[in-house]
Amino acid sequence: MKIKDSIVFVTGASRGLGLAFAREALARGAAKVYAGVRNPERFSEPGIVPVKLDVTDPASVTAAAKIASDVTVLVNNAGIAEVSESPFAQDVEDQARRIFETNFYGVVRTTRAFEASLPSNGNGGIINVLSDVTWRPVPFLAPYSASKAAAWSYTNNARLQLRERKIGVVGVHVGFVDTDLTKGFDVPKADPVDVVRQAYDALEAGESEVLADDGSRDLKQSLSAAVPGYIDPSVLQA
Ligand SMILES: NC(=O)c1ccc[n+]([C@@H]2O[C@H](COP(=O)([O-])OP(=O)(O)OC[C@H]3O[C@@H](n4cnc5c(N)ncnc54)[C@H](OP(=O)(O)O)[C@@H]3O)[C@@H](O)[C@H]2O)c1
């Protein structure tokens, strides 16, 4: 499949990776690009159509899917992250519920609302933005990591279910990316545009997974080792 002439809907497209997904789709010749945003009145990007969307609100997701019933490629990008004191912090349960509502149930809700209208002729696709924390333990991000691991599992089930309809499903794993989400972290970060290009290239090539940086590739490589990176991160090179 090609992004050219496709109709793309990106959740959480107001900024960061989502805005990069919307702009890159347009650059690749998409026939229409919808930006799913919480505040459409504040969104102004030439050639991109804003649609009101809060992935935590079922009515909002249903309404967006009705407006954008011509979508051929869905990008589940909207996400939130919060730092926890530890996996046992006093508020960790509330925090996990809040994060899951966006990063897991948001993906489930949005995919469910859009999948029926995706085409079954080889032009349909879904990209789910996951993370390297799917596999990397980071105790101060315990609820966020769990939400991405759950979304990874859902992605794999969705892929299998949609295979018969020739709808490709790509899971994107990446560590720190240079967006608002990581602005407090003084660490090397991937360029959002590079991550987005890899994701679209994978979908166009019929691939199922993107390991967008050295850290994610290193982690994946370690998964079958006797001591994988998820048990002891010190075995990892990157
Ligand atoms: N940055 C990283 O290092 C990194 C690494 C791996 C994975 N990711 C994942 O990449 C995705 C995008 O993150 P980012 O780095 O671009 O973060 P970001 O700059 O903080 O942007 C997050 C986007 O998600 C939107 N959003 C949040 N909650 C939403 C909701 N309930 N409904 C609709 N939209 C919502 C935000 O909208 P508003 O403008 O309205 O807040 C914003 O557009 C997330 O899934 C994140 O987990 C990021």
Image: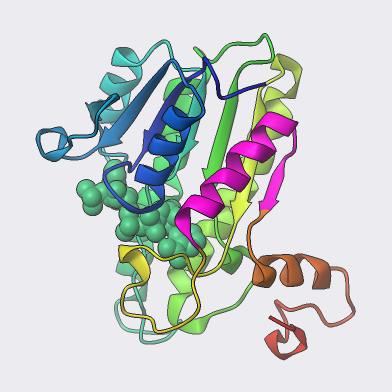
- In which quadrant of the rendered image does the N terminus lie? top right
Foreground of the two, 92 or 169: 169
- Total tally of numbered discs in the picture: 0
Residue 214 visible here? yes
Foreground of the two, 167 or 215: 215
- Name the residue rendered at 90%, 80% in the picture: 226
Please report the bounds of the magenta region as a residue range. Answer: 191-210
* Image-quadrant location for residue 32: top left
Asked if 119 appears above or below 187 in the picture, the reply is above
- Name the residue rendered at 65%, 38% in the picture: 201
Residue 157 visible here? no
- In which quadrant of the rendered image does the C terminus lie? bottom right
Q: Is residue 232 left or right of residue 56?
A: right
Q: Where residue 104 appears, x then y in whole percent?
A: 46, 49
Asked if 2 appears above or below 153 in the picture, the reply is above
Q: Is residue 71 left or right of residue 14?
A: right
